[in-house]
Image (cartoon, rainbow, N blue to C red):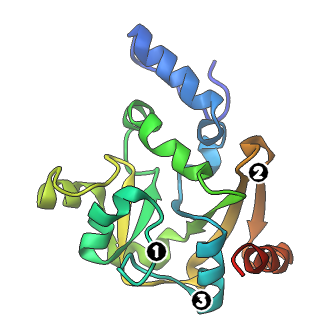
């Protein structure tokens, strides 16, 4: 009987079973039930501070410093979209197969990463699914297969349902924050101190 958040694996392939176990033993797999229904934008303290101060998650443009080296050739920058993780879209097998390519982005930033759950209903009309990028640009631009989606235009702070704060030094000590949690004040002060 599978545990909560761990659907049964259909494959009998030994490598698929190892990948499946590795995925569910990691942070993202352990939070599978919580993360799967949502759309997620992941950033560091600098990005978090900008989002809190402007009231929006801004699309990728050349106005902002690239977060990752591959950002310069990303589909998001090419189109001027906001990058999101859409864990509800792909089948579980694809999440697991490609997990080594995308799960580390959830705890990449030092001293912490902040994943923001965007309310799907707030962005459905302006959401670009993964298969659109594949059809449009193939492999000429960088994006995560299966799990990355994009939003056309800025996303208002009011569309963020909750936050997952993941320390770089120990991702198992993550913390959930609601949109109106008083801890945002502390995070904002920390972000100012880190980037002043």
* Left or right: 132, with 86 as reference point: left
Q: Is residue 158 above or below residue 117?
A: below
Q: Position of residue 57 (x, y in %)?
A: 51, 80
Q: For the N terminus, which image quadrant?
A: top right
The Cα–Cα distance between marks 2 and 3, rounded to whole angstroms, is 24 Å
Query: Which is more N-terminal, label 1 or label 2?
Result: 1
Q: Position of residue 123 (x, y in %)?
A: 43, 76
Q: Is residue 134 above or below residue 24?
A: below
Label 1 secondary element = loop
Residue that sits furthest to the bottom in the current view: 54
Label 2 secondary element = loop
Query: Which is more N-terminal, label 3 or label 1?
Result: 3
Q: Position of residue 31 (x, y in %)?
A: 65, 43
Q: For the C terminus, which image quadrant?
A: bottom right
* Left or right: 63, with 78 as reference point: right
The residue under label 1 is 65
Q: Which of the 4 image quadrants contains residue 66?
A: bottom left
Q: Residue at x 52, y 50 (%)?
A: 105
Nearer-the-camera pick, 69 or 38: 69
The residue under label 2 is 174
Query: Which is more N-terminal, label 3 or label 2?
Result: 3
* Left or right: 14, with 161 as reference point: left
Q: Is residue 118 above or below residue 164?
A: below
Categorize mark 3 by other alpha carbons within 10 Å: few (<14), some (14-19), many (20+): some
The Cα–Cα distance between marks 1 and 3, rounded to whole angstroms, is 19 Å
Q: Which of the 4 image quadrants contains residue 78?
A: bottom left
The residue under label 3 is 55
Categorize mark 2 by other alpha carbons within 10 Å: few (<14), some (14-19), many (20+): some
């Amino acid at each position: 009987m599978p545990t909560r958040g761990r659907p049964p694996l259909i494959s009998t392939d030994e490598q698929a079973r190892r990948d499946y176990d590795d995925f569910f033993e990691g942070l993202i797999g352990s939070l599978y039930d919580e993360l799967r229904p949502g759309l997620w934008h992941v950033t560091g303290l600098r990005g978090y501070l900008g989002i809190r101060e402007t009231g929006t998650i801004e699309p990728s443009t050349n106005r902002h410093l690239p977060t990752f080296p591959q950002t310069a050739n990303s589909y998001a920058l090419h189109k001027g979209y906001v990058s999101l993780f859409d864990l509800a879209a792909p089948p579980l097998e694809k999440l697991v197969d490609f997990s080594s390519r995308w799960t580390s982005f959830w705890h990449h930033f030092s001293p912490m990463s902040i994943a923001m759950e965007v309310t799907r209903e707030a962005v459905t009309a302006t959401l670009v699914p993964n298969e659109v990028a594949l059809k449009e640009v193939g492999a000429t631009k960088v994006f995560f297969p299966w799990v990355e989606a994009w939003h056309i235009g800025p996303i208002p702070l009011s569309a963020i349902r909750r936050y997952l704060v993941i320390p770089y030094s120990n991702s198992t000590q993550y913390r959930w924050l609601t949109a109106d949690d008083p801890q945002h004040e502390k995070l904002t002060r920390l972000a100012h101190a880190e980037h002043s």
